[in-house]
Amino acid sequence: MGAEDCFQAFEQICRLNLKKVQEREVIRVLLQCCLTEKTYNKYYGLVAEKMVQHAPQSYKYTLKYTLWDHLKTIEKLKVRQVVNLAKFYGGLVANNSIPLHFLKVVDFSSEHSKPLLLFLHLLLDTVFEESETLKEVFERGLPKVSNKRALNYDSDSDDDFMQSKKEARSKAEKPEGEDNSEQLKEFVKGFATFILTKFYNRVKDNEALQGKIKEAFEVIGDRRNTK
């Protein structure tokens, strides 16, 4: 990444006139560079934010699956890589570039490995510390669900490869990892419980952070109580 700042880097990427597949490789290279840093550099997150603003569907798609790939093998990452990964994605959640429900592949009903637990805590730390629209982050990131379908689902956040509702309904079988109401219900319940127990208990002596967490309680409670 030879650009002087995130704006120059974004302009250089735009001048390349990349195809969809090539655009996705940019995200992967960007994150790989981020993980090699000894300490987290916000430059990479700012470049990713600009890219999402430029082409939301393409870049959100890649950010989601790149995250899932790293979560599958997170035990193989070094501590500094886990830290950089968490802060990179936490920053993108905080500024509403990507939604919280990209974490739906995490099984919140089971015990987490130390690397995954570190990732989740640092990601949430970043979200609560950096977000200026915290309630919106949770409203868009924790979709309401019912027994029949997902409700209040942010259309920009996860319509990556389903181009219309009609097309989505026409698919008799969905590939692994694609959304369904049952998966969303389990995610919302598990993620909310994680925040209200493990995460909250860890920061219970931090009054400033507790105040921000309480700001999200209304949304979390609403999502958990949806029938």
Image (tube, rainbow, N blue to C red):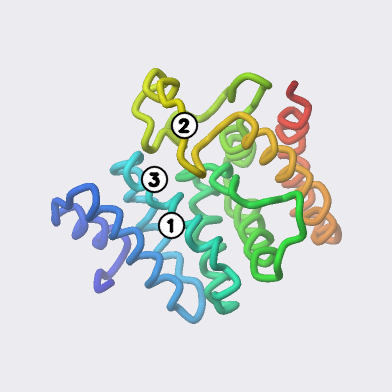
Q: Earlier in the sequence, mark 2 or mark 3?
A: 3
The residue tagged 1 is 66
Q: Which mark is residue 173?
A: 2
Q: Secondary structure at mark 1?
A: helix
Identified at 60% across, 45% down, the residue is 104
| Percent coordinates x, y for residue 195 in the rendering | 75, 49
- Amino acid type assigned to the residue bearing label 1 in the image: Thr
- Amino acid type assigned to the residue bearing label 2 in the image: Glu
Q: Secondary structure at mark 2?
A: loop
Image vertical order of residue 178 relative to residue 165, above or below: below
Image vertical order of residue 33 relative to residue 9, above or below: below
| Percent coordinates x, y for residue 77 in the rendering | 54, 75
Q: Residues within 10 Å of mark 1 (few under 14, many from 20)?
A: some
User: In the depicted view, which residue is nearer to us: 93 or 120?
Assistant: 120
| Percent coordinates x, y for residue 210 in the rendering | 79, 51
Q: Which mark is residue 61?
A: 3
